[in-house]
Image (tube, rainbow, N blue to C red):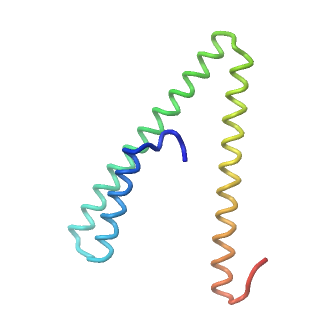
Amino acid sequence: MQNWFDNSCKEKVTQKNEARKKWMTSGKDEDKEIYQEKREISEKLCRRKKKEWWESKLNNLEHQRKSNNTRKFYKEVKKERKTEKESRSRNAKINLEYWKKKKSRHSGNKIT
């Protein structure tokens, strides 16, 4: 989980998910509209929080660069690259597992 995903984001996403469940069980247009509103609110909030988080990180990096803290600057860059690489690797593993399960359900065979 990223540092930008705080309690306010979690709360809005939970409200959105609850509204979606309600809409899916009722099938009413008014519940769909409520869900869409909550989805828009949660997406805007999370986008804004993530943008603020990245701007803060970039400002910190820029400060390190300008103050000739080369070692600290590159240490932070390396840390971010490692985090991003781990995140991509984790997502690839999740996708692979998803497709393995999906294929095995349809073909009746297990994939190893």
Q: Nearer the viewer, residue 71 or 34?
A: 71
Residue 30, x across and y down, in percent? 20, 67
Extreme-top residue of the structure: 67
Which residue does the image show at 67% across and 69% down from the upper left?
97
Q: Report the label total.
A: 0
Indicate the quadrant where residue 60 lies. Answer: top right
Residue lying at the far right of the rendered structure: 112
Q: In the orientation shown, which residue stands out farthest toward the bottom?
A: 108
**Quarter of the image where one finds residue 38:** bottom left
Q: Residue at x 60, y 19 (%)?
A: 62
Would residue 66 appear left or right of 48 to someone viewing this image? right
**Residue 70 x, y percent position in the rendering:** 73, 16
Tell me where residue 81 appears, x and y as whole percent: 70, 37
Residue positioned 33% across, 64% down in the render: 18
Quick one: quadrant of the C terminus?
bottom right
Q: Is residue 74 above or below residue 24?
A: above
Is residue 18 positioned above or below 52 on the image?
A: below
Q: Is residue 93 above or below residue 71?
A: below
Query: Residue pushed farthest front?
Result: 7
Residue 104 versus residue 52 in the image, above or below: below
Q: Residue at x 61, y 22 (%)?
A: 61
